[in-house]
Amino acid sequence: DTKKKTNGKAKPVPMELIRVDQQKAAAETEILRKIAYQVGVDAESVTAQQAYQGVAWTVRERLIDAFNKTQAYWREKDPKFIYYLSAEFLMGRTLTNAVNNLGLEGEFGEAIRKLGYSLEELQSQEQNASLGNGGLGRLAACFLDSIATLSLPGWGYGIRYRYGMFRQGLENGYQSESPDYWLTNGNPWEIPRRELAYKIGFYGSVQQGKWVPDEQVYAVAYDNPIPGYGTKTVGNLRLFDCQPMSEFKLASFNEGKYSEATDAKRKAEDISAVLYPNDATEYGRELRLKQQIFFVSAAIQDTLARFKKTHKDMKELPSKACFQMNDTHPTIAVAELMRLLIDQEGLKWDAAWDITTKSLAFTNHTVMPEALEKWPVKVMAKLLPRHMEIIEKIDSIWKDSLRAKVTSEVGSQPKQAAPEKAAEATKEAAAEPPVDPVEAALAKYSIITENPWEKGVKLVNMAFMATIGSKSTNGVAAIHSEIIKETIFKDFYELSPEKFQNKTNGVTPRRWLAYCNPGLSKLITKTLGSDEWISKTDQLTGLKQHADDKAFQKQWRSIKLENKQRLADLIKSKTGISVPTNALYDVQIKRIHEYKRQHLNMFSVVNRYLEIKAASPEERKKFVPRVVIIGGKAASAYVMAKKMIKLVTSLGDVINNDPEVSDLLKVVFIPDYNVSLAETIIPGAEVSQHISTAGTEASGTSNMKFQMNGCLIIGTMDGANIEIAQESGKENMFVFGVDAKDIGRLREERKNFKVNDPRWEKVMSFLTGNTFEQGLFQDLVDNVNDMSKANDWFLLGNDFTDYLRAQDEIDVLYKDQDAWTKRSILYTASSGFFSSDRCIDQYAKEIWDVKPCPVPSS
Ligand code: CRA
């Protein structure tokens, strides 16, 4: 009864008709037909957009053929599936990836050339599918590529936002934002399944144990086929669009109440309208929770419906399905799966709990406190009353199971023992009636907690619920997985250490090396004697033996130069700034955030600028020319991050126009950073910056992309940098900064800290001096420099001197181009570990228990 409409019973199609349909004409004939009948233009002359449409709709058919075969094969074999639940999938563009993964580059390349275009030109016509903020969303996209490539039965589930990540512009050097309507030209890569719609409820009450929602909408499925590389397998990303139950109230319309007539429709459409533009920062809005339950409920209903077609016993679900929850965003799944199993399938609580905790798995992506979602009980109870009831019951059963243990621990402690931190928070609120020491000690395990900042306000801690309701919890890099065991999940780790795992992130070598860097890719294939490395990245180690070969180095360098030229062209077209290709290209592209410390980068730029200015003409010749490139978006409400963008653009205005500096230093902010820009920027970069305060960046993933493309790294011992240093040799990385284990102490000591480096003072005075509008950067400077207020939470002052030392090392090495190139080769050669294929293989074996089910070749 969840279905909106059905197409009725399917009728068999005669065999001879099927055969005729499957006889495909040559690509160029098909493309011309598409241009004529799909695009609807006379093919005598076609624009790039029309040619793109013709090609894309043709490739779509090849994709669907393989997709249908894969899905039919999996239906027949009934293997266990992985369902990747994620609020974000940052897919970028599809055409090049689809053509190459399907092995169509020869046939289609030729056809496109005949039309007078290149694949690259047509690709640039495609809008980016920016349905994600940054690392987490792009990771999900890389994972889908690897799941299909490894022929693992698996689908992604998410939201088909009509507006993706906002478009960033610059106004007077400040970020401006405009909506990203990415569907203006249609979307050849999706298959609408209008007949597949699930009811999603909100609000209402619980009556006789069952939920009676006040408001209901439909989740309508859109399939996005995901081609694997070197396999016939084509997986799926199923995204849901939100639709009203009925189009509009005709009665209100007739009465002239037009806005009332379409109220429900608008409200429903709001749910899948916009991606929240926050990267690892606060959410807390009711609409956001609506989005979460919306796609999670649809995904689980969809899965259960398929499961029930072939299985009677719900207890078999964990052997047929695993749901991986990508951060806390989909963790309402714990309560939703329980609700569906109990209220709809009629299971008893214990049986349902057993199935739930065997089917769900959870990944944590951050320790930033503001990103750990905690929903007010009030909001949850209003929007999802039945779920709130279930959550309360989970919480109380969970605490009951711990009571005996906690009682004996409390009993063995001296009477006046200081309560644990979490208990401390509740202590104040419940100050009057004496707190039962056992209950107080249990509080640290509780899903429902008191808001430490708002007396009497209760919150649902989604990360705790996720851990309790899952078979495994994992972090995304070795250091991060250790940190979560010592901090946010300490008490849970001590209870069940076996549940905690590490899965160091990875990125797809297809998009991030083979396709975005065709020059280097060709050289690697020629050198290794085959292109097997594209799916077996361990083979890249074969490049090591060529690292000292001067002729090879020369080829390597000339490819880099071509890529730098492409990047210089991009910079020119996006910003109007001309940058020389003989300079060192230094790149930091990622979300703008204080913990990522783009301002530390800028402090070093200021220092360099001042040094150049102070040098004599003769001394200036010794400087290595540098182009410092920054790209990234700031969350719309994040004032300091926006100021950091203004800092970059203002420095650019001063430095780029200073004739004394000329080509020795350029500072460029590339606006509207996104996936496709990254595909041009990364291959052209020579050094890239990953300089977060140790312990703050869970993993980072662009570091891996840069490494693959032979771009050297300056970085802190944080996130995956640590493992990259292990693979490439720590001595080959420009490592600086304080250690993660000292961060706590250093933060404590900030009040008495002074940066013992005259260059720091010079940089601060420059930024607050008369070069810029009075007071423009005062807040930014105070934030890192006003020690009376114990500022500088991200410890820029502590790392400043060491950072400049590492920067100097970069210049020294760059003067020796052979030594530099050797390192660059070694980076690529040792990047194999960071393929998402390796990462997904580990998830499949160590968490999901999902095995490859490749479609046979014939
Ligand atoms: N912002 C982390 O901060 C990590 C990615 C993917 C992040 C990155 O260090 O590489 O996830 N965390 O694991 C996050 O989104 C909600 O938390 C990110 O993208």
Image: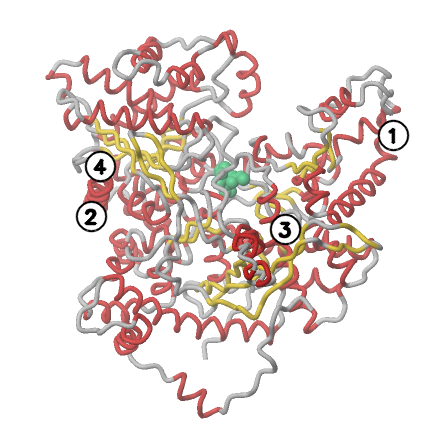
Q: Is 757 above or below relative to 737?
A: above
Ligand 1 within 8 angstroms of badge 2 C-beta: no
- Image coords of residue 504 (percent x, y): 52, 43
In the rendered structure, the answer to whether residue 626 lies left or right of residue 782 reads left
Q: Give the residue number, with chain letter if any, for mark 1.
A: 407
Q: Amino acid at mark 4?
A: Asp
User: Marks 2 and 3, Cα distance to the nearest angstrom?
Assistant: 53 Å
Helix, strand or loop at disc 2? helix
> Is the C-beta separation of discs 4 and 3 under 8 Å?
no
Q: Amino acid at mark 2?
A: Gln
Task: Give the quadrant of the N terminus.
Answer: bottom right
- Image coords of residue 434 (percent x, y): 87, 20
* Disc number for residue 293: 3
What residue is at 51 percent from the left and 12 percent from the top? 790
Q: Give the residue number, with chain letter if any, for mark 2.
A: 555
Q: Amino acid at mark 1?
A: Thr
Q: Amino acid at mark 3?
A: Ile
User: Marks 4 and 3, Cα distance to the nearest angstrom?
Assistant: 55 Å
